[in-house]
Image (cartoon, rainbow, N blue to C red):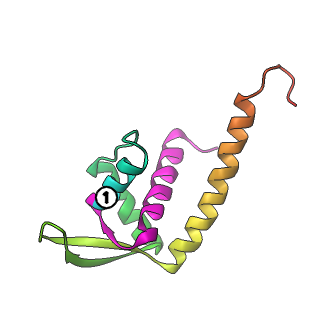
Amino acid sequence: MATDADLLRSTLELLILKSLTWGPRHGYGVADWVKQSTGGDLLIEEGTLYPALHRLEAKGWIEPEWGVSENNRRAKFYKLGTRGRAALRAEVSTWERYVASVARALAQTTAEPA
């Protein structure tokens, strides 16, 4: 059975992968994309973000490359690899089924399932 930590970890990884579908981003860019795309509801702290990026890198889902940020500073950028694109498709499908199932359960108005 998945724990709350597992659910949060997989959700964060899904959002990171999604943020990279438009091209490479550095860590701050990933966190900013999540913040902006969720209307500020989800904020990712550095202590959570960078371990997640390292996990995804270890899985071979993202690939690091050094570059220069918009502030003209050296930064590690991450790009979505082929395996990461496949993982994103699978994870989105799983997430959509999960959300639909929870929504169905929450919409129940009687004790007997429909």
Which secondary structure, mark 1?
helix
Left or right? Give the position of 114 relative to 13. right
Q: Residue at x 46, y 69 (%)?
A: 21
Estimate the x, y position of residue 26 in percent, counting from the top left: 28, 66
Q: From the image, which quarter does the N terminus lie in?
A: top right
Magenta stretch containing residue 26, yes or no?
yes
Q: Position of residue 109 (x, y in %)?
A: 79, 21
Residue 23 locus on image (x, y percent): 39, 73
Magenta-colored segment: predominant secondary structure: helix
Image quarter of residue 42: top left
Task: Say above or below: 70 vs 49.
Answer: below
Residue shown at 34% from the left, 50% from the top: 48
Q: Is residue 111 left or right of residue 90?
A: right
Name the residue rendered at 12%, 70% in the picture.
73
In this picture, which residue range is highlighted in magenta?
1-28
Type of the residue with mark 1: Tyr
Closer-to-camera residue (23/17)? 23
How crowded pointer 1 is (Cα within 10 Å; few <14, some 14-19, many 20+) is rated as: some
Answer left or right for 81 relative to 111: left
Q: Is residue 111 left or right of residue 102?
A: right
Disc 1 target residue: 50
- Quadrant housing the C terminus: top right
